[in-house]
Amino acid sequence: MDIRFQCQPGCTACCEVKGYVYLTEQDLERAAAFAGLTAQEFERKYVYRTRHLLRLRKPRDRNCEFLGAGVCTIHPAKPTQCRVFPFWPEMVEDRREWKRAGKFCPGIGQGPLVQIGTALEKSSEMKKAYPSMY
């Protein structure tokens, strides 16, 4: 499979796809510190906790609280799910899913060839971070 990806400047297309942003405990702590809040304060304000997963609360008018005008306002501390995109297992392991993601992500198909080992290593971060999803 020919895997090419290079994030495009100013692109937030991946943030505008319908869905949820999941967090690890480490993601929560990192984002809280970046926002100048304790983990408890950040969770109370921005996080919904289920029995097995944490996810960012979704504002009524957009997909993510931290999506500003074409920019992620917590970019240096963004969750694993966001940081690893588009190297999610379901996309790296299935050519059709990779091509489907390329319809909304202008970075897919751009830039240098990504070695399959590198892509699989990045996708394994998702499996480790969110084992109940994989």
Image (spheres, grey):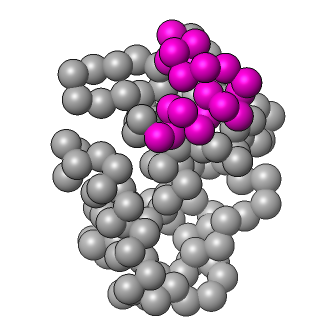
The residue at 38%/74% (across/down) is 121
Q: Main secondary structure of the magenta part?
A: helix
Check the image and report above or below for 5 versus 34: below
Q: Position of residue 35 (x, y in %)?
A: 71, 27
How far from the left and from the top, in percent, is residue 76?
A: 70, 48
Residue at point 76%, 42% (across, down): 71
| Closer-to-camera residue (84/25) | 25
Is residue 43 highlighted in magenta? yes
Q: Quarter holding the N terminus? A: bottom left
Which range is magenta? 26-44
**Residue 66 drawn above or below residue 58:** below
Res. 68 image quadrant: top right
Seen at 27% across and 72% down, the residue is: 93
Question: Quadrant location of residue 49?
Answer: top left
Q: Answer whether residue 98 is visible to the viewer in this image.
A: no
* Rendered position, 27 above or below 110: above
Q: Nearer the viewer, residue 122 or 90?
A: 122
Q: Is residue 11 left or right of residue 23?
A: right
User: Where is residue 126 drawn, in percent x and y?
Assistant: 35, 56
User: Which image quarter: residue 5?
Assistant: bottom right
Please tell me which residue is depicted at 55% across the width and 70% down the height of the picture.
108
The answer, for residue 102, to whether it is visible in the render is yes
Image coordinates of residue 117 in percent, x first then y, are 38, 86
In front of the other: 16 or 132: 132
**Left or right position of 22 against 12:** left
Number of marks in the rendered image? 0
- In this rendering, the answer to whether 9 lies above or below 55 is below
